[in-house]
Image (spheres, rainbow, N blue to C red):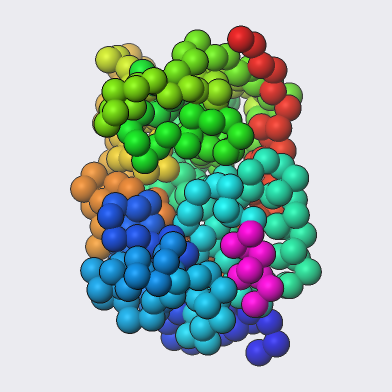
Amino acid sequence: MNTSESLLAELARSEKPIGVGIIGLGAHGSWAERSHLPALRAVPGYELRALSASSKQSAERSGQKHGVSRTFGTAAQLVACDEVDLVVVAVKVPHHRELVQTALSAGKSVLCEWPLGNGLAEAEDMAQQARSHAVPTVVGLQARSHPVLAYARELVADGYVGEVLSTTVVGSGGAWGATVGPNDRYVLDAANGATLLTIPFSHALDGLASVLGEPEELRIQLVSRRTSAVDTESGQPVPMTAADQVVASGRLPGGAVATFHYRGGMSRGTNFRWEINGTEGDLVLTAPIGHPQLSPVTLEGGRGTSTALAPMTVPESYVRVPRLEPRTDAPAYAVAHAYRQFLDDLREGTSRVPDFAHGVARHRSIASVMTAA
């Protein structure tokens, strides 16, 4: 095999495990520990073979906790490991480009968390490098892989709601509210690229686009109503330069209206509600937080002569990772389904999981915004 693309496809078709190395798998509740680790262990076809952390000692502690024998203190050492076929970059956004470049330079395929880059220019650079190395890539926009969204996509395509007239999304970001944990302070600084706009709003936007099509003429406004948050550990105020309100509107293919409102913190009322309204019926998706990519999602619907919503059960055929439970394993659930779909893409030559080119398109869709104080 001359390229990582053909190697991964060969492994997938032969049902030999794809060797995975995770950059950023810590021992103390990291995102990779809560999502990628259980996801990989629930999807046959992958084998976690290596990890790297911020230091050799930290990596060794993590390896002991998670049962991973190959541990490295640097990303360069991890990507040089012959046992690693796919590198997962699961660290803070400002470090994505450097680590992705390191993996691509070693000829390895890469799954990078979303946001792909700290801004559009970085994402474009990474996508160009991936094309030049001719390796398959994945960007962590996993909401579209959630079984509930996959089922909603089929319902809309099959005419459950008739012609779509409008859709509305209201969500709470969790962070960017009155308080902030000491480990999340970096998301308050807009310069770090991990904002209400780039994380919960963009995940929801990508999920919506997978169901209803890409919104056109999308107009986004950012508003800063809070300028600081209180650190829950120190009790001291922390400056917040990232906007805590995102309001957007656009038109769907065919002319339907799409509106969004994301707000920082949590609401005592609605924290995620997505309505799809059509000429024949309605679909409503809800979740306890405004992050459908890492939350259990509930689906309700009503059509025809019905005057109320009723719960809808997702058919078993959409549940591709039965080892995980959508509520207790919520952070890993959609991630695992994305890994499962990536295997199918490699085996069948399809491209349903978002790659770096898709990541660039998503960055571009949120690049032009209006900002108000």
The picture quadrant where one finds residue 19 is: bottom left
Which residue shows up at 47% across the image and 13% down it? 226
- Spot occupied by residue 53 in the image (x, y as percentages of width and height): 42, 65
- Residue 25 falls within the magenta-colored stretch: no
As displayed, is residue 76 above or below residue 286? below
What main secondary structure does the magenta stretch of the protein show? helix
**107 displayed left or right of 112:** right
As displayed, is residue 83 above or below residue 341? below
- Spot occupied by residue 291 in the image (x, y as percentages of width and height): 41, 35
34 or 45: nearer the viewer: 34
- Spot occupied by residue 275 in the image (x, y as percentages of width and height): 44, 23
Segment colored magenta = 98-106
Which residue shows up at 48% across the image and 54% down it? 91
- Spot occupied by residue 289 in the image (x, y as percentages of width and height): 34, 30
As displayed, is residue 73 above or below residue 120? below
The picture quadrant where one finds residue 241 is: top right
250 or 293: nearer the viewer: 293
193 or 267: nearer the viewer: 193
258 or 373: nearer the viewer: 373
In the picture, which quadrant includes the N terminus?
A: bottom right
- Residue 99 falls within the magenta-colored stretch: yes
In the picture, which quadrant includes the C terminus?
A: top right
**Whether residue 26 can be seen here:** yes
Looking at the rendered structure, the number of numbered marks drawn on it comes to: 0
**Whether residue 280 can be seen here:** no
Which residue shows up at 75% across the image and 45% down it? 121
Which residue shows up at 68% across the image and 82% down it? 3
